[in-house]
Amino acid sequence: DTAVSQTPKYLVTQMGNDKSIKCEQNLGHDTMYWYKQDSKKFLKIMFSYNNKELIINETVPNRFSPKSPDKAHLNLHINSLELGDSAVYFCASSLSRSRLSTDTQYFGPGTRLTVL
Amino acid sequence: DAKTTQPNSMESNEEEPVHLPCNHSTISGTDYIHWYRQLPSQGPEYVIHGLTSNVNNRMASLAIAEDRKSSTLILHRATLRDAAVYYCILSPNFGNEKLTFGTGTRLTIIP
């Protein structure tokens, strides 16, 4: 009964390839996020979607494209992978896009991407 | 985003209370104070949050200074499972739900 799940857990690929990471939440939340944690352990927001609508798009290369087929899923597609894309990617969700910032975010277990 | 300052690391003995400080001198009146923690090889998890008053939940307590320029996360009885990186995060209560993580405090629990 994992609340926020991600697949795969590990992803090893060559430079230049295109890959996807999937995220699903079964909490009935309206908002989902992607965060990136680099090798120095800094955790940064990449994207946020609410009910399939993009609401946060930080300065991320356009090789990264989130796709939300429904509000329970937010997938991350990465084209033309580069060495610097190696990181742990975390998906998260929160209840709603209300004007309150008190909505707790629930994080997935992470996907460790290694680009060779 | 308002900035927070935390010690890089702290140690505590098992079964003793732990006080994790956070300075946020530029906090605005509408900023909530959130604490998350990240256990090894896991995603961050919510610990507690507050605005002005002290808060308690089953995991921890949050003590907020009267001027709100600092706060302290209190683990009442640390266990080995509490070893993690603890993040103090400010988040405004209008229109912006992103969490801006700093470097956090790495808490080591000594058996």
Image (spheres, coloured by chain):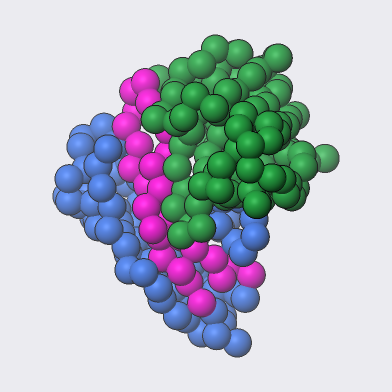
How many marks overall? Answer: 0
- Residue A34 is at least partly visible in this image: yes
- Residue B46 is at least partly visible in this image: no
Q: Colour of chain B?
A: blue
Q: Colour of chain A?
A: green
Q: Which residue: 60% across, 74% down?
A: B79
Q: For the N terminus of chain B, which image quadrant?
A: top left
Residue B55 lies, with reference to residue A40, above or below; the image says above
Based on the displayed image, in which of its 4 quarters is residue B11 positioned? bottom left
- Residue A38, given in percent of the width and then of the height, sits at 50, 52
Based on the displayed image, in which of its 4 quarters is residue B77 positioned? bottom right
Q: Which stretch appears magenta?
A: B81-108
Q: Nearer the viewer, residue B23 or B77?
A: B23
* Residue B105 included in the magenta stretch of the image: yes
Q: Which residue: 45% across, 42% down?
A: A44
Based on the displayed image, in which of its 4 quarters is residue A24 positioned? top right
- Residue A6, given in percent of the width and then of the height, sits at 73, 39
Residue A79 lies, with reference to residue A70, above or below; the image says below
* Residue B92 included in the magenta stretch of the image: yes
Q: Which residue: 63% across, 43% down?
A: A15
- Residue B21, given in percent of the width and then of the height, sits at 32, 64
- Residue B108, given in percent of the width and then of the height, sits at 51, 77
